[in-house]
Amino acid sequence: MARQRPARPHVSMEAAMAGAEEIHKAIINRQGEKDMANTTCKTCGAEIRWVKMATTGKPMPLDAKPEKRVIVVGHFGDAGEDLGAVVDTYTSHFVTCPQAEEHRRS
């Protein structure tokens, strides 16, 4: 028997785009709350930026250059097609730093 696609809430294309716009505005507003000046990693010298994690309040280093990625922001149409938006994402500097272990806490 063929697998059935799970039921998803259906919204109009206009509503989905409005939702995507609200998500984008929220991201921009959060980025503007704090000056995220770029700095340099003490061990490898790479350019990084710092963010305060929303869940823990702890600072986290990120690679300074963003990458374009697509996120699913909603569903539309009778078939519930996914609606995507291109956003800037940042990689944790702990992933790319050759000396990351020197900075980790137990």
Image: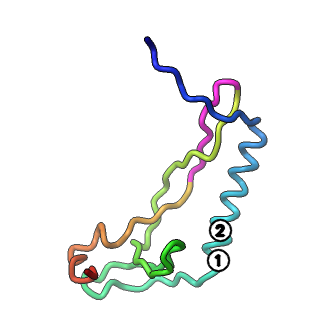
> Mark 1: which amino acid?
Gly
What whole-number distance in Å separates the C-alpha atoms at marks 1 and 2?
Answer: 6 Å
Magenta run includes residue 84: yes
Secondary structure category for the residue under label 1: helix
**80 on left or right of 51:** right
- State whether residue 61 is above or below residue 85: below
Q: Label 2 belongs to which residue?
A: 28
Q: Residues within 10 Å of mark 1 (few under 14, many from 20)?
A: few
Q: Label 1 belongs to which residue?
A: 32
**Percent position (x, y) of residue 11?**
74, 36
Say which residue appears at 27% left-offset and 83% top-offset: 103
**Percent position (x, y) of residue 7?**
61, 29
Secondary structure category for the residue under label 2: helix
- Which residue extends farthest bottom? 42
Q: Which residue range is magenta in the image?
A: 78-86
Say which residue appears at 53% left-offset and 81% top-offset: 36
| Quarter of image, res 62 | bottom left
**24 on left or right of 42:** right
Quadrant into which the C terminus falls? bottom left
Say which residue appears at 40% left-offset and 65% top-offset: 91
Magenta run includes residue 88: no
